Image (tube, rainbow, N blue to C red):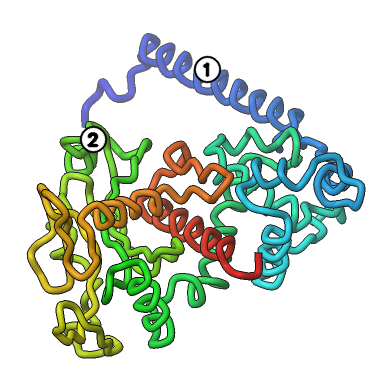
Amino acid sequence: MDPNLNEFNLEYFQQQWELEDKMFDRQQELLQELLTREDQPRKRKSICRDHQAAHERLMSDYFDESCTYTDAQFRRRYRMNRPLFLRIVDSMSNFGVYFTQRRNNAGKLGLTTIQKCIAALRMLAYGVAADACDEYVKIGESTAVECTQRFCEGVIAMFQDEYLRRPNVQDLERLLEVGQERGFPGMIGSIDCMHWQWKNCPKAWQGQFTSGHKGTSTVILEAVASYDLWIWHDFFGLPGSLNDINVLDRSPVFDDVESGEAPSVNFTVNRRQYNLAYYLADRIYPKWPVFVQSIQMPQGSLVVDDIKPLQQVHAVKKIVRDFDLNVPADRGFDLNKFPVEEEFQIDEIQKTVRIMLGIYLSKFY
């Protein structure tokens, strides 16, 4: 047994005493800090937004019989006329409980359906930040973002079967008849690709999404549009580094033709019968029977069954107008500025805008 173990070491005792004293002081500091935290409010400061007053002001501005602003002003600001907006509002209220006015846990009435739809349309129309809708609509930033996402989901769920469907037999007959009248027998639309700017593309993805001739990050949209702006095919989401041919190789536009499920057609050109409709396209597209490109250098009075090269060029370029989504006498939705962070959000937004464009161009409005 070591005799030194029973000896009293004053220096060691003082060190242990000082260590325990420091630990005790630290415990007292932590206890005092916890007590101080309990005295402070632990919740965020509640902002009292008068939703009812904001709703009444909104109705007085746009929807009452003697409203402040005219139909033209509403159409310019929200990219649609009032009957179309009210139709969408009615559909959103029937889509789910989210767009209905409800009471919160404190028993206070929340936002109305019109307020939520107005906030979503402002963000879609102008690309403004979610916080910019607060002053007029009295809606929080996170709620405005959620309203926009739910609005897109609701519009797609309620209307895509009607306005994003492929043409049936009756539609093809109408398109062929119009094509015949315009001097293009057998034409059912125009096909082209456009680059959609992705302002908030993540840094790690900018290499594959950057287009060489655009100089910025883009997402490609391939679409087929008819003479009346009906865009009944879209293929969206490929990176901007691809071209039209690369997109066509991945596109499902001709899947129904390949599987034999496409509706049959019949037309005559140069005294020859054809049973496969075609699209007007740019010269980058391959020499397939389903594509008709413009003549590169038309000379003289070249006419083939009344199909003039200049008319063909104009018809092909019309697809660019279709992609701009510019409603007559109005501007389109400024989607390039919309603060989206994910690719699937851009897909939902462009589908929503095309559906609303289709509703706008329908015969009811």
- In the image as oriented, which residue stretches furthest toward the right? 66
Neighbor class of circle 1 (other Cα within 10 Å; few <14, some 14-19, many 20+) is few
SS for tag 2? loop
311 or 136, which is in the foreground?
A: 311
Q: What amino acid does circle 1 point to?
A: Asp
Neighbor class of circle 2 (other Cα within 10 Å; few <14, some 14-19, many 20+) is few
Q: What amino acid does circle 2 point to?
A: Lys
- In the image as oriented, which residue stretches furthest toward the top? 11
What's the mark number on residue 214? 2
**Looking at the image, is 327 positioned above or below residue 20?**
below
Give the residue drawn at x 44%, y 61%.
Answer: 229
Please tell me which of labels 1 and 2 falls first in the chain: 1
Q: Quadrant of the C terminus?
A: bottom right
Residue 88, by quadrant, is bottom right
Residue 225 appears left or right of 42: left
**Cα distance between the residues tagged 1 and 2:** 69 Å
Residue 309 appears left or right of 320: left
Residue 136, by quadrant, is top right
x and y percentages locating residue 230 in the rendered image: 44, 65
137 or 232, which is in the foreground?
A: 232
Residue 104 appears left or right of 183: right
x and y percentages locating residue 13 in the rendered image: 42, 16
Residue tagged 1? 21
Give the residue drawn at x 22%, y 79%.
Answer: 255
Note whether residue 87 is visible: yes
Q: Quadrant of the N terminus?
A: top left
x and y percentages locating residue 176 in the rendered image: 34, 78
Q: Which dot, 1 or 2, sits closer to the camera?
A: 2
Give the residue drawn at x 40%, y 84%.
Answer: 168
Give the residue drawn at x 32%, y 64%.
Answer: 224
Note whether residue 99 is visible: no
